[in-house]
Amino acid sequence: MKTSGERLKALLDECHLTASDFALHRDVTPQHVNNWFKRGVPLARLDDIAELLCVQSKWLRTGKGPKHPPNIIREPNPAPSFLALPAGQEVHLPFYHLHNGQLLKLGDHHLRLQLKALQELGVDPDQAIGLQMPDNSLGADLPQGSSLAIARTTARLLPNERYAVLHQGKLHIQYLKRVPGGALQMRNQLHSEQPDIVLSRRQQRAEGVEILGWVFWWAMYRLQRPKRGKIANSKEQR
């Protein structure tokens, strides 16, 4: 890949995104994106696009240096804990990450959540896991590195709720609906104008579709301090 346009196209291919999908997300026309493929990514958009796709802007521009920012997916984002909970009032969910299309337990890492919150949601802690959002899940509004909590139950799909789905070895966060005949309707949560995907039972088996469960919690810290502008303090906001 000799140009930034070629690298951009390869990144979108990795994410199973068309030029139209990406154009919709960036509020430009598909022709703009196709022009970037041919002529290179405009310098004015390099930083924003690199941050969106979780790559280094230098790598996107020149092809040199590390592709991903350092330590971007080395450790899961810890669940924020503002108060130390007494023993028995929190649960430690096993933490997983996606590797080559398979869920693998991430060492001794656990996701700490309040037991009471899970009980109020009707989530069985023994049927829940933590999962880290990988870098090939563009299309969801949950960025790479996010920590997710997933209830491993699919007996009844709730309307307008996020579900974690493995599809062709990739993790997708989708709105799901079962339709007559056992087919599964998947709606991309970020691109509302994108047509729904409807897969028959045979297609689900052929394409390796597995519903991991209901995403009932998510969180992450910013990966870095914003480069432009400054964060207003309380006096400036008054």
Image (tube, rainbow, N blue to C red):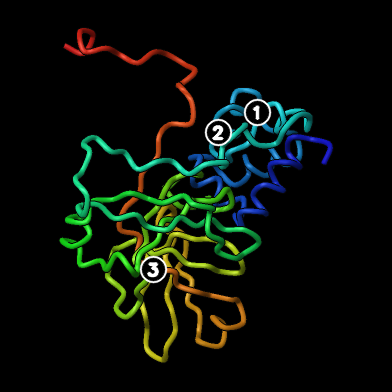
In the rendered image of this protein, does residue 145 appear above or below residue 125?
A: above
State the image quarter where residue 46 is shown: top right
Estimate the x, y position of residue 101 in percent, counting from the top left: 62, 64
Foreground mark, 2 or 3?
Answer: 3
Q: Residue at x 20, y 8 (%)?
A: 235
Q: Which mark is residue 51?
A: 2
Q: Are the residues tagged 2 and 1 within 8 Å (C-beta)?
A: yes
Q: Is residue 209 left or right of residue 148?
A: right
Which badge, 1 or 3, comes first in the chain's sequence? 1
From the viewer's perspective, tell me whether residue 38 is left or right of residue 19: right
The residue that mark 3 highlights is 213
Callout 1: 10 Å neighbours few (<14), some, many (20+)? many
Would you identify the image quadrant in which residue 14 lies? bottom right
Q: Amino acid at mark 1?
A: Ser
On-image quarter of the N terminus: top right
Q: Say which residue appears at 38% left-offset and 50% top-offset.
A: 111
> Which three-letter amino acid code belongs to the residue tagged 2?
Glu
Closest to the observer: 207 or 66?
Answer: 66
The x and y percentages for residue 77 are 43, 41
Residue furthest to the top in view is: 235
Closer-to-camera residue (9/226): 226
The image quadrant of residue 59 is: top right
Viewer-closest of 121 and 234: 121
- Above-or-below relation of 54 to 94: above
Q: Which residue is mark 1?
A: 57
The reply to whether the C-beta atoms of the residues labelled 2 and 3 are less than 8 Å apart is no
Q: Residues within 10 Å of mark 3 (few under 14, many from 20)?
A: many
Residue 178 location, x and y as percent? 37, 80
Q: Is disc 3 placed on a helix, strand or loop?
A: strand
**Amino acid under label 3?**
Gly
Label 2 vs 3, first from the N-terminus:
2
**Picture quarter with the C terminus:** top left
